[in-house]
Image (tube, grey):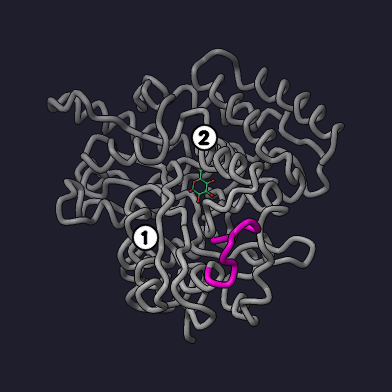
Amino acid sequence: MTFGHRAEGVEVTIGCGGGGADKAMCFQYAQQWALKTGNTVKNFSPPGSFNEKLALYRQLFAAHSSDLDVLPIDVTFPAVLKDHLLDLKPYTKGLENDHFANMIAINTLNDRLIALPWFSDAGVLYYRADLLKKYGRRVPQTWDELTATATAIQAAERQAGRADFHGFVFQGKASEGLACNALEWIYSNGGGALMDAQGNITINNPHAAEALNRAAQWVGTITPSGVLNYEEEDTRGVFQTGHALFMRNWPYAWSLAQKPDSPVRGLVGIAKLPGSAQGPGVGTLGGWSLAVSRYSHHPAEAADLALYMTSAAVQKQRAIEGSLNPSRPALFQDPEVMSAIGDAAILADVLKTAVVRPTNITGFKFPQVSQNFYNAASDVLAQRTSGEEAVKKLATRFKRIKRESW
Ligand code: GLC
């Protein structure tokens, strides 16, 4: 395929701003496209976190701003931003069929393809293989086993003089990362996914309450109290410097843990998150796509850049260099990709079985639903309320939002 055959010499702005190695890698490949096509690219670096990015996009779109041509969007953004994004179908000529069908479905609204999948994501458990071996423990299969193993190994490591060693770190800040974690705790505990496929609100149930209460007990015991302010990169900081036994994070953290200067290089394993007596472990489905703003002055070049960035060649490199999992099934068979992402078999399974946030039910109301959810989870973690109270209140809130529309 040739990229950039439409015109030459325009400036296209892309919003490279993911966590970890994502930002630099994103811009590097955008510049590669510019070199190939004779265009130039500029980086409009949006803030790293989900919530701040969404807020910024909404602001730019409200002003019909042409400041950003190509923008990364989360799997949960399409219904919220759809009116401001270009239909990419006229540019793709069927190439979207090389991606996972579920990611194309997420990005297709009213028969408009509003973004191209860039990488797929799902929550996984990272563990210190060396420490599990040292203490004769296995990778935990249930949350209770994780709690017991983390308690025992944290105590032993502290006894040995490592006062700042922790059992488990995760994303506990009141933001979308916590929504993903809490959904995993609840779903794998038999508590459902906030609502069912028909839109009936299911969150007010004892299994959901129990899962939140269990998580609250981690805070200040096997998890540092600071977790209430942790997003993905804070969590990785603790784990990668060798201060935690277990970490919940996304696949991107794998390649960074394996860098030559990483204190835990060669000591880390990756597994499916734990389950419970009620069911197997599950990761929340995540992932990012590239969209083109309707207000772009250079839509053809912007679409061309999005096609280049999501091509098999670039996805392969980003998988090898940054363990960003491809959105193309064919690349999961590629030996170089398979050996770079940690454990391709586990990741393929986690992606296939992942629990989906209820975006197709809630539509453009998703951010509001999710905000209520992570605030409730945060209240339980901070022991401001009980799991039972939190899920009861949430059901009432969801009902109110539903009455207005979804
Ligand atoms: C990751 C996921 C994304 C999720 C976000 C939450 O970036 O890919 O889907 O919304 O984390 O922090």
Number of on-image labels: 2
Q: Residues within 10 Å of mark 1 (few under 14, many from 20)?
A: many
- 105 vs 228: above or below: below
Displayed quadrant of residue 159: top left
Q: Residue at x 72, y 53 (%)?
A: 83
Residue at the image point whose x is 47% and y is 73% from the top: 308
Q: Residue furthest top?
A: 384
Residue 221 falls in image quadrant = top left
- Disc on res. 178: 2
First to last magenta residue range: 290-301
Front-most of residues 49 and 183:
49
* Residue at screen point 39% across, 27% down: 227
Residue 287 seen in the current view: no
Name the amino acid, label 2. Leu
Residue 282 x, y percent position in the rendering: 54, 49
2 or 1: tag closer to the N-terminus: 1
Any magenta on residue 296? yes
Crowding at dot 2, Cα within 10 Å, few <14 / some 14-19 / many 20+, comes out as many
Q: Quadrant of the C terminus?
A: top right
Q: Residue furthest right?
A: 403
